[in-house]
Amino acid sequence: MPDRSLGVSDSTPWPAGIDHSPRRVGIFGGTFDPPHVGHLVTAVNVLHEVDLDVVLLMVNNVPWQKDGTRDITPAEDRFAMVAAAVEQVPGLQPGHHEIELGGASYTADTLGVLADEFPDAELFTIVGDDAAAGLATWERHEEVVARSRLVVVDRPGEPVSLDDEIDWIRVEVPRLEVSSTDLRARFTDGRPLDYLVTNPVLRVIEARGLYGVAGDGDGDGDGDDEVGAPVGAPPSQSVVSS
Ligand code: ATP
Ligand code: MG
């Protein structure tokens, strides 16, 4: 488990014992309910293309845009899934800052915390086209733009174009038509999740019994659960192909 109070400094993507204060920090915020390959492919490609030292997959505490529209998985469960998703991936780290801040999560606040944590770093806010299209509705969006450079990545659909006055860049990433909404529907229907979600994430889902998946009750996430038995799904179905 990373040291949440210090963000990236506990389980860092760098060898221990050397000063590796990140200079270029990407913040990729989301509900991650659940995190999927679209998120991961985006994060690693932006890390590479923008030459970032780290990308923080920042788990929203209360996603204000989604609040009240559906049941949202508890924030600590979503954080556990994101932590599992990035555990073996150099340069990607789970972000716990918004959960610590509590309440509704606003990127402007998060950037303020990160600016204190990494005073010498340049900050990059990474968003998909759909999220970028709603930028004007974000709480204190001027602050977001002032404190960070926006990195917009492709999502299937019409590419968004932002105001010339805004400091933003577009990064091409493989377009993967995957969404958490579709994945939640797959859990409900018993359709396969293989290759859309990584196995470490599926193990957290089983261990914690998320999305109606019945685990074996030992809660150890070791993958020996009676996996892939979403409520109402045929008993033979498996969500983990290990
Ligand atoms: P939901 O369907 O519940 O809205 P989601 O798949 O859109 O989930 P979010 O957690 O809402 O995921 O998204 C977090 C960020 O990831 C947003 O900036 C969003 O644009 C981006 N994103 C999500 N899915 C993809 C994808 N397949 N490719 C690129 N970016 C993505
Ligand atoms: Mg979304």
Image (cartoon, helix red, strand yellow):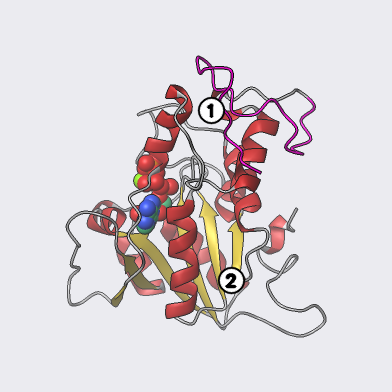
At 65% from the left and 29% from the top, the residue drawn is 227
Magenta range is: 218-242
Magenta residues, dominant SS class = loop
Residue 120 higher or lower than 64, as above or below: below
Return the disc, 2 or 1, that comes first in the chain's sequence: 2
Question: Does residue 230 show up magenta in the picture?
Answer: yes
Q: Quadrant of the C terminus?
A: top right
Whether residue 222 can be seen here: yes
How crowded pointer 1 is (Cα within 10 Å; few <14, some 14-19, many 20+) is rated as: some
Residue 161, x across and y down, in percent: 18, 67
Residue 124, x across and y down, in percent: 43, 72
From the image, tell me which residue sits under label 2.
Answer: 116
Residue 239, x across and y down, in percent: 57, 34
Question: Does residue 39 show up magenta in the picture?
Answer: no
Residue 174, x across and y down, in percent: 36, 64
At 25% from the left and 74% from the top, the residue drawn is 166
Q: CA distance from mark 2 to mark 1?
A: 36 Å
- Work out which residue is located at the far front of the displayed protein and give it: 236
Numbered label tally: 2
Q: Amino acid at mark 1?
A: Tyr
Q: Nearer the viewer, residue 9 or 105?
A: 9
Based on the displayed image, in which of its 4 quarters is residue 133 positioned? bottom left
From the image, tell me which residue sits under label 1.
Answer: 211
At 57% from the left and 48% from the top, the residue drawn is 198
Whether residue 64 can be seen here: no
Asked if residue 107 lies left or right of residue 113, the reply is left
At 35% from the left and 55% from the top, the residue drawn is 176
- Work out which residue is located at the far top of the displayed protein and give it: 232
